[in-house]
Amino acid sequence: MPRYTGISSEAFRHPLDRQAEQALRSVPGFDLVAGKFVEFMYERPQTIYHIGNSIQVNHRQYATIHRIFRECVADLDVQPEPTLFVSQNPVANSYALGKDHPYIVINSGLLDLLTEEEIRAVLAHELGHIKCGHTTLIQMAMWVMSIVSTISEMTFGLGGIVSSGLIYAFFEWRRKAELSSDRAALLVTNELDTVLSTMMKLSGGSSAFAHELSLPEFIRQSEAYQELDKDNLNQIYKFMLYNGFGAGSMLSHPFPVERVHYIREWAESEDYRNIKSGNYKRGDTTGAVDVSQSPKKENKSESEAERLKRQIDELQDEINRLKRQ
């Protein structure tokens, strides 16, 4: 497997990830939420929870997974090495959290569904989140949503500050952050088909009928999905689905067929070829987002936040129009 010694996350971070983070930080209320998060949220209890309720992977527990994981850590030059847990859960899922003590959790359902190389892609994807410093903002987004869903009024001084615009911005960033981590998976596996087959199985894979799945058909499905954008009304429907209109909840990940499009595009890019040849930006071996100090707001970032609000307003106008038809 390739090894990218000293690689910086900026070498593979998706530009949409950067733009969405800038827009998020410019939304009114972000600074207050960041300050309250640092004040009230501690990551250590989460680690203790998993030590008590999950299996900590090492050379004697899930030895094969441990070997693959350590290879991925070395390939992306992530330091220090995060902790890896396997949680008893039939849902094929995984996630990475923590800043000072980062950790990754993969569900047992994922181990039952994927091949070893596909598990490598998942582990590299989660390490990509840690490398890019996504984990603090992800945990902050989860914290904000838990507050909004359980207590509607004043909580930790956040009451009217946690606006719908801030929540939309958090979820927009989370979806774009996945595109950077997909690139990390491709860099480590060195096989585009492995990354794509992982996405296909996580969309609707079955261990019993895996032999009847067709990756070329899934790619064609992705291409057909992109064709939908030629119809402006379909773009509105996509926006509605991503942001919980009619579906009941906002989506933290892009649709898998959309991720297929983005990673296939990057696999053909000059940037990807340069990294593969060893020509990449080098820097810190791990990423971290400092939520206690937001960068100065630029006019461009402010316009991104305004654009998000305008899209929401336009969406509501279109919903009203459709109702009148």
Image (cartoon, rainbow, N blue to C red):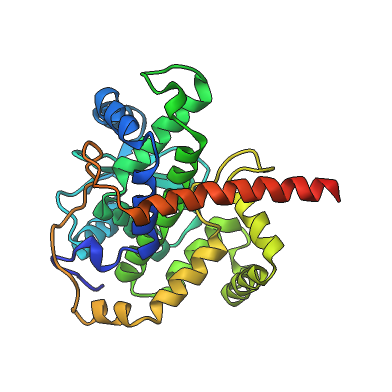
Which residue is depicted at the point 57% across and 51% down? 311
Q: Is residue 314 left or right of residue 289?
A: right
Which of these two is toward me, 127 or 251? 251
Q: Which is nearer the eye, 202 or 165?
A: 165
Tell me the quarter of the picture where residue 282 sits. Answer: bottom left
Report the side of 303 relative to 321 (left or right): left
Q: Position of residue 114 (x, y in %)?
A: 47, 59
The image shows residue 139 at horizontal and vertical percentages of 35, 37
- Image check: 284 left or right of 219? left
Residue situated furthest right in the rendering: 325
Out of 135 and 191, give the one closest to the viewer: 135
Is 10 rendered above or below residue 273? above
Q: Is residue 205 visible?
A: no
Residue under the point 21% across and 47% down: 288
Name the residue nearer the viewer: 173 or 304: 304
Q: Is residue 74 visible?
A: yes
Residue lying at 43% horizontally and 67% vertically, measured from the top left:
195
Residue 13 picture quarter: bottom left
User: Across the whole image, how many numbered discs are drawn on residues?
Assistant: 0
Whether 78 is drawn above or below 196: the answer is above
Query: Quick one: quadrant of the N terminus?
Result: bottom left
Residue at position x 24%, y 47% in the image: 296
**Residue farthest toward the front in the current orientation of the protein:** 299
192 lies above or below 74 = below
Tell me residue 101's x, y (percent).
20, 39
* Position of residue 22 measured from the top left corner of the image (x, y, whole percent): 34, 52
Q: Quadrant of residue 48?
A: top left
